[in-house]
Amino acid sequence: METLIQISKINDFLFCPRSLYFHSLYENFSDTTYHTSAQTRGRLNHTTIDTGTYSSDVKFLQALEVYSEKYGLIGKIDIYDKEKKMLIERKSKISFLHQGYFFQLYAQYFALQEMGFPVEELVLRSLEDNKRYTVPLPTGESLREFEETIDAMQSFQMNHSSLETNLKKCEHCIYQTLCRPDL
């Protein structure tokens, strides 16, 4: 049986597969042990979604747990607008449209589709500056890249010697002292 992939881990994996490994080590610890201030701010921004208090309008599904059997994915969405058939992923501040953001939305999209919710529009929303980015639906090259990433996550084995290191990413990684104490 394949291991289910948490949708929220896709962006971490694309940042660095090692961060995914170290993240799993810390999952049972308090977030204050390893979260940076940006991550803490992001968690606080999610409070209205997680508690279902973003909106009382019944057209919005909030923090719905989703599952994709086809891709072996599990997680939660932020917001699904039933009337507009729009899936919205909120981020504290989007300064760059990372591939991981797209793939996280794609994973939610496929899970919602399998669960019978039609999705016609994907949106990333930057909360700090109130910007909205429309994300194209996954087709062709973007679908292939998404599927390759999911396959890579399913087959990932932690092996320090086989992983390339991006020192620029390492400098900003919260797991740097565990993974690269030499930096």
Image (cartoon, grey):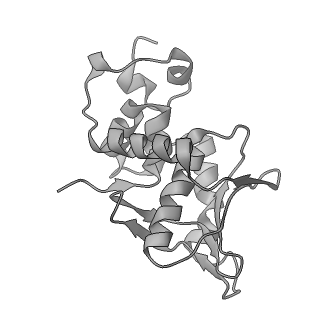
Q: Is residue 102 left or right of residue 145?
A: right
User: Seen from this angle, which residue lies furthest left?
Assistant: 1
Residue in the picture at 60% in, 66% down: 47
Give the answer, above or below, for where 5 lies relative to 70.
Answer: above
Residue in the picture at 39% in, 55% down: 6
Give the answer, above or below, for where 66 lies relative to 99.
Answer: below
Q: Is residue 30 left or right of residue 170?
A: left
Can residue 34 be seen here? no
Q: Quadrant of residue 25?
A: top left
Residue in the picture at 67% in, 85% down: 59
Q: Quadrant of residue 48?
A: bottom right
Estimate the x, y position of residue 85 in percent, counting from the top left: 66, 75
Is 28 in front, or is 74? 74
Q: Check the picture and name the quadrant holding the N terminus.
A: bottom left
Residue in the picture at 44% in, 43% down: 33
Estimate the x, y position of residue 145 in percent, counting from the top left: 48, 40
Q: Is residue 56 left or right of residue 67?
A: right
